[in-house]
Amino acid sequence: MFARSIPRALYHTSRRKTQCQSFRFPMLSRVQQGKTQSRQISTRAAAKKLFQEYPFSFSLACFLILTGAGSLLYTTYVYNTYIVANLHNFPEPVANKLRRALFYSNQDVNPKKAVNYYRQALAVADEIGMDPFSDEILGTKIALASFMEKVNQHQKAIDILEIVRADCKKWLETTGKQEGRQADRTRVLAKTVAISVKLGDLYADEYIADQDTAGKNLIEGVETALKEQKRREDEGTLDGEGPWMSNEEMGGALESLANHYEQKDQHYLAAPLYLQCLALLPQTSCHAVVLMNNLSISLAQQIPPPTSTTLPPSRPALVSSARTWAQKSLSIAAGIKPPERNEECDVGCAVATHNLGEFAEMDGDIAEARRRYEEAKGLSQAIGFRGGVERAEEGLGRVEKLAG
């Protein structure tokens, strides 16, 4: 059984007619026209001759010229769209350093230069008095951590985010409690939650593999988010606070914690969280298909701890419930059409079909299990999902042994 989850401007020029433009020199125009035509003919003839004598070299040269021109245009577009346009909220001295940092982060990747320019940008921002807890400065620090992760410096990314979160917590306990800072408090608190969730993901990845610390960070992030939501429900939103986290943001935090519990085989803790995520998302989205599938897997593998005070459901009841959620995910995915339909729907269908095969195998229905595995293999092959093909073949191998 397995799961798969899938972080222009136009310008116009005006032309002004002058007296000189309306006055023509016929003889001069014909001479110029003749020269132009002669030049065009000679150029075409030369190009044709070069192609006939050096067909491979000429074609390669044309390809390289066109490729270079295309790359230049693309680089210019990326620079203006993603680098220049995103820095309009920064004072020019800071923006100048950040442009260089982003260039060495995304275009000509050079970690040493990128980090140096990020540090220079933050130093200049501090000198000119930018708010260290503004979205711009917090975003710059988070971008630096993201770049550290990108270049596989995961521990440095963690160190940066730990410092930023600690600073945010101190701010919330002091400045954040002052009158008139309600909107800033909401903004910084939401950033703190997001950083906690990201730290949980970083501690859990294969480079660090500290599942306990990952769990603590994820729990802290989810508890902080739910506590603030509960306060607002009980007391109401205060003047100037603004809205709290969106359903999508809240669902993302809950899903990260659910995935953590699933990886630790604590499916009895993951299932309720997946259910909460589903309550926050539109039921007709491809991500809902993934969540339903994950929920079905958690239900099928639930083993409540022995200290549980309530009588756990029977094994057949859990498998039946898991089957229902997997079938529901397939039903919803079937109704989602492009452009809303994406890879999550396609992979979710393949995984759900495979898991229905495993549920049938658990019940001893070999014929149904074989049918589902074959269907899952076909779906996986159609979308290029190699992992799905491999798992389906493993399932088919098992049922062949059981049938033999």
Image (tube, rainbow, N blue to C red):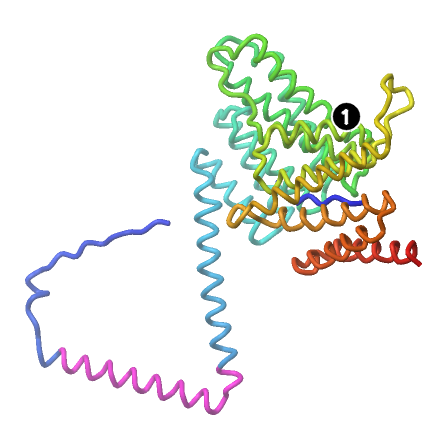
Which residue is more in the foreground, 212 or 395?
395
**Residue 192 magenta-highlighted:** no
Residue 158 is drawn in which quadrant? top right
Q: Is residue 139 above or below residue 46?
A: above
Q: Is residue 79 shown left or right of residue 108? A: left
Which residue is more in the foreground, 1 or 362?
362
Which residue is more in the foreground, 305 or 125?
305
Q: Is residue 324 above or below residue 22?
A: above
Residue 229 is drawn in which quadrant? top right
**Residue 53 magenta-highlighted:** yes
Q: Position of residue 4 (x, y in %)?
A: 71, 45
Residue 185 is drawn in which quadrant? top right
Q: Position of residue 164 (x, y in %)?
A: 64, 27
Q: Position of residue 119 (x, y in %)?
A: 59, 36
Residue at x 14%, y 78% (from the top left corner): 29
Query: What residue sits right under mark 1 in the picture?
Result: 216
User: What range of the chain is rendered magenta?
Assistant: 29-58
Q: Is residue 57 above or below residue 335?
A: below
Going by the numbered disc 1, the residue's amino acid type is Lys
Secondary structure of the residue carrying numbered label 1: helix
| Image quadrant containing the C terminus | bottom right
Q: Is residue 109 shown left or right of residue 323? A: left
Q: Is residue 199 above or below residue 79?
A: above
Q: Position of residue 381 (x, y in %)?
A: 70, 60
| Image quadrant containing the N terminus | top right
Secondary structure that dominates the magenta span? helix
Circle 1 packing at 10 Å, graded few (<14), some (14-19), many (20+), is some
